[in-house]
Image (spheres, coloured by chain):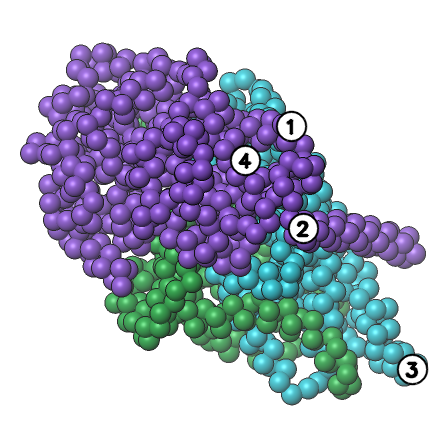
Chain colours: A purple, B green, C cyan
């Protein structure tokens, strides 16, 4: 009895000690924040300690994490008086979105954000805490010239430059030359070749197109090919119907994996990279993993019959650099210096070696894989590029639209019904 | 033993009340408010729209499916999870060897997080890589799409129910072990069989524990989310959608927090209704010994 | 312990062993279902990411620890720090719930006052509320209290979230305990506090241990809250660190399996320890008649 009591007492006191230690550490952390917010005005790089909170999507196994951590380290080495507090959070599970929204709601935004454009800019702008970049760009023309003016324009919100575009993505049709050659198929650059490939492959027990029917990629490719960029911007227009009906047709011809309705994107990618599927329409971020296989090629999605979107690419700059307004000059200057550093051609070049297409000039590091180069060339030669559908519509109507496409692929709803339902939600959301 | 000292009542209960109010009740009241508003993207703009969200809720076909599935899940949780746990506890209690072994091993699935279990089962059910189809191939049978509109909710039920049987098992086992031996001794002298013993003595004495477990099973079934989301995402075609997954979908994917709050309120009402009914059915006077 | 099997076996002849065999067969069958997934996680962690999908249920082609090595390389993940944080956070939650919940249960099971049944309603309602429904409102409250960025921002809401379960379990247990010792203590003039601390608590060790291991587990596996509330890498518990192996672009299944395997290990150890405590407590308490 006594021994048991003693050991129980020990466990309790151990846990209490841990709790006390944690309290101290926790309070210590809080005190730090308090201290840094009571700085006086001062000029940058004057030797005064500045703490910069940065929240980006470069976390976990994001492909650019190593480029990011290197850049952060070399920035701190070059600027010993600036300490970076890295609050980067992964994008999946909506963690980053939730964090930034929670921060925005409580007036707790980080000093520098690398975050989504589009409808998310609206939320940040509503906090009245973010900077509009026109002034700084005007003050530093040399830095401003490294940005692609057309892209800068595309990410404006209400005519103001709240976000500086950086890494862009593109979507393309990846195809496995080895599998195509094995079945004497031509490259899927025309619709006829594409459909012939679908039928031949399906007959030979190879999945023609690796996709989940819960992700939007191939659906968007079809819509863009059908209605072109102008049509893409008209939310749920009836002119999209023929493209959507193609989805049903492809599904009937067994172009998709049998369990596409419950497949997730990871497994779809695995089907393609594992050679069980011959084509995949997906984004440039997957190119990073595929680039080690020389048989994988990329091409724009072919033009569908009667379509207006020839050689058009779904591409966009989904995220950009935001900066918080700050009365403290030292804090503001440090944040500005950091953003300028990250968008400099050298640093951007290191990110570019990993993948993606860039809105700034990048210094070629000579280590980019051929598939990535091919992808970039595809974008460069495209007639035009347009952001994915979800940049133009409300999230709620979009998720409903995608679910509706699942119903359509299995013949449970018609294209017109899906479009009408999504449009109803979209109209409601505008109000 | 009945004390009456009011000071202690207040003192001992206040921390609990304060914590529950601050972190659970206050947000719930806020949710009630939000359910009457139009609130998108977690922005600062919330416009009052009266009963519109509730009207949409009643007309939404997905809500009907989600409701049906949630009820199926709750029934499954009560009968198979809690019931299974009870059965296993009774059986384990009756054998001499392996008591510790079973007690340890049955708990394993709970230690593995829902995400990992979801991943495992999503691979099992997968068409190209999955275990089920591998078995079909080995038996020379044609491969199947396992997750169809009709089967999805039942297939998803399997990992959810299976994971937490061990939880109820441990609770019931603890309850059974507390029953003093002498009660059984007198019954044994009368020569009753094991099964009679279980139904006439053990289970009635566990009545309170059973009532608690029914509440827990209902609450757990209402809240389960990650396993379903990973295995089917609510598909195919919303057929395995639950109220919890639909609420998550509307709040985080669709960014419509107003409607999501409406779903939360519906879930709470459903849960309260079911627990009240269950408790009335099970609880009579507390039996003590 | 009761003897279902023994009584079934009281029939003469081969029937005697048949009953027991059936019981064991059922128990062992269930044990297989609970052990297999754990084995699967361990074996998968030794396979390459592709192999996990293509050869999901066979033995690994090569037994390699490359996944564990890869985990180490994932953008400055300090695994030990993660474990320390988990221990701190989850340990504090358990202590908080045990303390506040214990006090509340004591009052609810031993004191008489009006409005007691209201509390039951309160707890049921709080248990039905899903975590992700309150994640943003909770954050706002944390900010009001100036606790954001500290460990308290996850500890307090988790204590609140688990109190209902703990109180439900503990009140039931305490109510069923006979009150003679306490009555004797009152006669001797002991204070309420002493009765709680010295008499009731030691008897409640089994239920405290059972409840605590569950709460520790749930807190340990909790992902979304620390992910959002504690963005600073140094403070993140192991569940967050290990989830970082999957991102929006694709999942490294191999690393994920290794991550799951690592995170499960301490839980299993803790569970075994807590089971020892529970069993000792039960055998000590069961002697009372």
Image quadrant for the N terminus of chain C?
Answer: bottom right
Q: Residue at x 52, y 75 (%)?
A: B279
The mark found on residue C189 in the picture is 3
**Both on one chain, marks 1 and 4?**
yes
Camera-near label (4 vs 2) is 2
Return the chain for callout 2: A
Return the chain for callout 3: C
Q: Are marks 4 and 3 in contact (CB under 8 Å)?
A: no
Camera-near label (2 vs 1) is 2
Q: Which residue bears the numbered disc 2?
A: A40
Q: Residue at x 37, y 24 (%)?
A: A287
Instruction: Identify the secondary structure beneath mark 4.
Output: helix
Return the chain for callout 1: A
A170 to the left or right of B85: left
Q: Which residue bears the numbered disc 4?
A: A337
Q: Which residue bears the numbered disc 1?
A: A77
**Both on one chain, marks 4 and 2?**
yes
- The percent position of residue C165, horizontal first and vertical second, equals 61, 64
Residue C193: image quadrant is bottom right
Q: Are marks 3 and 1 in contact (CB under 8 Å)?
A: no
The front one of A148 and B283 is A148
User: Which is more N-terminal, label 4 or label 1?
Assistant: 1
Return the chain for callout 4: A
Could you tell me how far apart the alpha carbons at marks 4 and 3 are, in whole angstroms?
72 Å
Could you tell me how far apart the alpha carbons at marks 2 and 3 are, in whole angstroms?
62 Å
Could you tell me how far apart the alpha carbons at marks 4 and 2 are, in whole angstroms?
19 Å
Instruction: Identify the secondary structure beneath mark 2.
Output: loop
Residue A42 showing in the rendered view: yes
The front one of C238 and C121 is C238
**Both on one chain, marks 2 and 3?**
no
Residue A92: image quadrant is top left
Q: Residue at x 31, y 39 (%)?
A: A153
């Amino acid at each position: 009895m006594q021994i048991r009591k003693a050991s129980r007492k020990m466990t309790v006191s151990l846990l209490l000690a841990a709790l006390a230690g944690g309290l101290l550490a926790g309070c210590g952390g809080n005190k730090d924040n308090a201290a840094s917010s009571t700085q006086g005005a001062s000029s940058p790089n004057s030797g005064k300690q500045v703490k910069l909170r940065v929240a980006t999507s470069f976390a976990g196994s994001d492909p650019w994490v190593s480029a990011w951590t290197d850049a952060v380290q070399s920035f701190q080495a070059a600027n010993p008086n600036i300490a970076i507090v890295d609050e980067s959070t992964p994008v999946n599970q909506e963690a980053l979105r939730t964090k930034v929204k929670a921060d925005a709601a409580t007036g707790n935004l980080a000093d520098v954000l690398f975050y989504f454009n589009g409808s998310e800019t609206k939320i940040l702008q509503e906090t009245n805490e973010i900077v509009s970049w026109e002034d700084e760009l005007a003050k530093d023309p040399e830095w401003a010239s490294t940005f692609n003016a057309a892209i800068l324009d595309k990410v404006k919100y209400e005519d103001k430059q709240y976000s500086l575009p950086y890494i862009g993505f593109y979507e393309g049709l990846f195809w496995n030359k080895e599998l195509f050659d094995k079945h004497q198929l031509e490259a899927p650059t025309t619709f006829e070749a594409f459909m012939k490939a679908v039928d031949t492959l399906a007959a030979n027990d190879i999945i023609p197109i690796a996709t989940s029917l819960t992700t939007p990629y191939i659906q968007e490719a079809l819509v863009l090919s059908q209605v072109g960029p102008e049509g893409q911007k008209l939310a749920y227009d009836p002119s999209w119907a023929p493209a959507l009906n193609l989805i049903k047709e492809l599904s009937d011809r067994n172009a998709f994996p049998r369990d596409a309705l419950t497949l997730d994107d990871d497994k779809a990618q695995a089907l393609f990279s594992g050679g069980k599927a011959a084509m995949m329409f997906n984004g440039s971020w997957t190119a990073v993993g595929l680039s080690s296989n020389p048989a994988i090629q990329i091409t724009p999605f072919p033009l569908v019959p009667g379509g207006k979107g020839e050689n058009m690419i779904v591409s966009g700059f989904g995220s950009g650099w935001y900066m918080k307004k700050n009365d403290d000059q030292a804090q503001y200057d440090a944040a500005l210096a950091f953003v300028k550093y990250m968008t400099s051609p050298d640093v951007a070049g290191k990110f570019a070696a990993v993948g993606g297409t860039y809105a700034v000039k990048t210094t070629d590091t000579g280590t980019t894989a051929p598939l990535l180069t091919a992808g970039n060339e595809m974008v460069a030669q495209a007639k035009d590029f347009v952001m994915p559908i979800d940049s133009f519509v409300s999230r709620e109507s979009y998720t409903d639209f995608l679910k509706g496409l699942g119903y359509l692929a299995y013949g449970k709803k018609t294209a017109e019904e899906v479009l009408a339902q999504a449009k109803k939600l979209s109209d409601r959301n505008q109000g | 033993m009945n004390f009456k000292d009011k000071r202690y009542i207040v003192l001992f209960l206040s921390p609990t009340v304060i914590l529950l109010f601050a972190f659970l009740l206050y947000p719930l009241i806020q949710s009630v408010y939000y359910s009457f508003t139009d609130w998108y993207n977690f922005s600062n703009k919330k416009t009052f729209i009266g009963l519109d969200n509730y009207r949409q809720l009643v007309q939404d076909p997905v809500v009907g499916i989600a409701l049906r599935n949630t009820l199926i899940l709750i029934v499954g949780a009560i009968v198979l999870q809690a019931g299974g746990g009870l059965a296993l506890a009774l059986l384990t209690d009756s054998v001499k060897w392996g008591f510790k072994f079973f007690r340890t091993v049955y708990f394993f699935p709970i230690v593995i997080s829902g995400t990992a279990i979801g991943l495992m089962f999503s691979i099992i059910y997968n068409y190209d890589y999955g275990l089920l189809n591998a078995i079909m191939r080995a038996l020379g049978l044609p491969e199947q799409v396992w997750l169809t509109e009709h089967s999805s909710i039942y297939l998803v039920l399997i990992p959810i129910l299976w994971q937490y049987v061990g939880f109820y098992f441990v609770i019931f086992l603890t309850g059974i072990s507390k029953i003093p031996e002498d009660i059984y001794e007198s019954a044994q002298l009368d020569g009753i069989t094991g099964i009679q013993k279980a139904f006439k003595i053990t289970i009635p004495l566990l009545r309170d524990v059973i009532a608690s477990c029914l509440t827990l099973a209902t609450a757990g079934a209402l809240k389960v989310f990650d396993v379903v989301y990973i295995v089917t995402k609510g598909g195919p075609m919303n057929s395995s959608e639950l109220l919890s997954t639909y609420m998550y979908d509307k709040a985080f994917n669709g960014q419509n927090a107003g409607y999501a709050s409406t779903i939360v309120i519906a879930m709470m009402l459903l849960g309260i209704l079911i627990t009240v009914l269950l408790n009335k059915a099970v609880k009579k006077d507390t039996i003590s010994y | 312990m009761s003897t279902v099997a023994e009584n079934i076996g009281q029939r003469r002849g081969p029937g005697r062993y048949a009953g027991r065999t059936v019981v064991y067969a059922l128990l062992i069958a269930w044990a297989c279902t609970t052990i297999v997934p754990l084995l699967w996680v361990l074996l998968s962690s030794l396979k390459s990411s592709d192999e996990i999908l293509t050869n999901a249920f066979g033995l690994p082609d090569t037994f390699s620890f490359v996944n564990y090595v890869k985990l180490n390389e994932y953008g400055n993940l300090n695994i030990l720090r993660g474990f320390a944080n988990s221990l701190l956070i989850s340990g504090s939650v358990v202590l908080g719930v045990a303390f506040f919940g214990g006090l509340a249960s004591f009052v609810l099971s031993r004191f008489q006052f009006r409005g007691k049944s209201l509390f039951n309603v309160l707890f049921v309602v709080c248990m039905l509320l899903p975590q992700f429904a309150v994640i943003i409102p909770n954050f706002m409250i944390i900010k009001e209290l100036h606790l954001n960025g500290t460990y308290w921002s996850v500890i307090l809401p988790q204590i609140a979230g688990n109190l209902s379960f703990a109180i439900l379990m503990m009140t039931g247990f305490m109510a069923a305990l006979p009150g003679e010792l306490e009555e004797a203590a009152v006669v001797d003039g002991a204070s309420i506090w002493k009765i709680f601390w010295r008499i009731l608590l030691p008897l409640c060790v089994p239920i405290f241990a059972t409840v605590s291991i569950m709460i520790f587990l749930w807190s340990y596996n909790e992902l979304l809250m620390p992910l959002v509330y504690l963005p600073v890498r140094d403070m993140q518990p192991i569940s967050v660190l290990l989830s970082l192996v999957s991102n929006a672009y694709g999942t490294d299944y191999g690393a994920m399996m290794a991550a799951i395997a690592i995170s499960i290990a301490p839980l299993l150890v803790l569970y075994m320890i807590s089971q020892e405590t529970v069993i000792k407590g039960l055998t000590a308490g069961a002697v009372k008649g």
